[in-house]
Image (cartoon, rainbow, N blue to C red):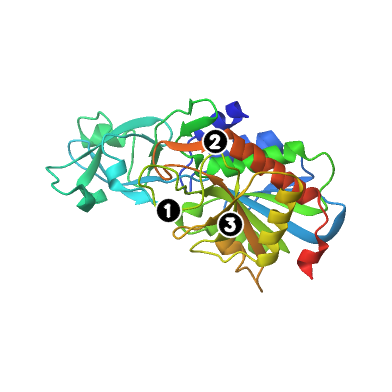
Amino acid sequence: MKELIRELVETYGPSGHEDRVRELIKAKIEDKVDEIRTDSLGNLIALKKGKDSSKRVMLAAHMDEIGLIATHIDDNGFIRFSNVGGISPYMLLGARVLFNGETVGVIDKEGKVDDISKLKHEKLYADIGATSKEEAESKVKVGDTASYYRQMDDLGDRLVSKAMDDRIGCIVLVETLNRLENPPTYDTYFVFTVQEEVGLRGAKTSSFGINPDLGIAVDVTLTGDMPEAKRMEVGLGKGPAIKIKDRSVLVHPKVKNLMIDLAEEKNIPYQLEVLVAGGTDAGAIHLTREGIRSGALSIPCRYVHSPSEMIDINDIDNGIELLTELLESSYTGLFE
């Protein structure tokens, strides 16, 4: 599984440019599902038919990562940019980025900044080694996007890389498909969404088309187990987190209790998550049409939206086990 994680997190795919990630995932799962398609927005939607087709379950994990977009190229070949998703300017100082998945750039600031908390994106620029506007434009054009340029490092049980948010959720979905020994109880749609980082856009369109009876987002969540971290009852290595609330959703009590009951019955370690900032695809799914019973399963992650996001492989493994148990269980009471 570590090599699959490496393959996904090192693949280029800022919001709106998820093509390479989508093709990689499609190749991994197309022989394990009954139907697979890409919708107009770019979501990859794979159906695993269940024993009972009277209900539809939607599992969603987003393929995109945060990034940058070129807004101006000056006469000396330096590139100005804006953010695509929540990427802090002070995280970018000295960072390397990759435009279009192929052109390396180094980020620096103009002039002196006395208070780094006041640093803005418009005070930063990317240097791709060009000496003129013409040379720069032969490699990067206005509107081109960039992502962090980082490899994955294996620290044992802990892995560090860019784009753990949310390629790890994609891993959970792929590996859940691999572990299913029987058809799921209900028709289950494994949806790999686009443009989550810029407004849950892929989840909005795909959930409208599928119209599920149950929706579960799989994403990362913050932790409170580092020095001077905000107090939060989530830490690495303590199991996947069952969401109660974030800024985008109040999880349906029946969905939350279903996951808790299954985790306790199967002796799967878990944590409870109340996230005071941020959201997931569940925020869009639960507001679809007349409303969808929705929840989320979160993988604890340190340093979210940095170039060095850290996860624990055991949390992923237990998350896959819990999701597999859920799909194979009988939960008719959920829909009453």
Q: Which mark is residue 243?
A: 3
Q: How many marks?
A: 3
For disc 2, the marked residue is: 312
Quick one: label 2 or label 1, which is nearer the N terminus?
A: 1
The answer to whether residue 77 is above or below residue 68 is above
Most extreme residue toward the bottom is 290
For the point 40% across and 39% down, the residue is: 147
Task: Compute the Cα span from label 2 to label 1.
Answer: 20 Å
Q: Position of residue 208 (x, y in %)?
A: 65, 64
For the point 53% across and 25% down, the residue is: 156
Asked which secondary structure carries label 3, the reply is strand
Quick one: label 1 or label 3, which is nearer the N terminus?
A: 1
Quick one: label 2 or label 3, which is nearer the N terminus?
A: 3
Image side of residue 216 versus residue 247, left or right: right
- Asked whether disc 2 touches disc 3, contact meaning CB atoms under 8 Å apart, the reply is no
Q: Position of residue 80 (x, y in %)?
A: 25, 45
Which of the two marks, 2 or 1, is nearer to us in this view? Answer: 1
Which amino acid, mark 2?
Answer: Asp
Which amino acid, mark 3?
Answer: Lys
Whether residue 212 is visible here, answered yes or no, is: no
Asked which secondary structure carries label 1, the reply is loop
The residue closer to the viewer here, 68 or 177, is 177
- In what quadrant of the picture does the N terminus appear? top right
Which amino acid, mark 1?
Answer: Arg
Q: Which mark is residue 99?
A: none
Whether residue 158 is visible here, answered yes or no, is: yes
Q: Residues within 10 Å of mark 3 (few under 14, many from 20)?
A: many
Most extreme residue toward the right is 51
For disc 1, the marked residue is: 231
Image side of residue 334 versus residue 308, left or right: right
- Asked whether disc 1 touches disc 3, contact meaning CB atoms under 8 Å apart, the reply is no
The residue closer to the viewer here, 26 or 93, is 93
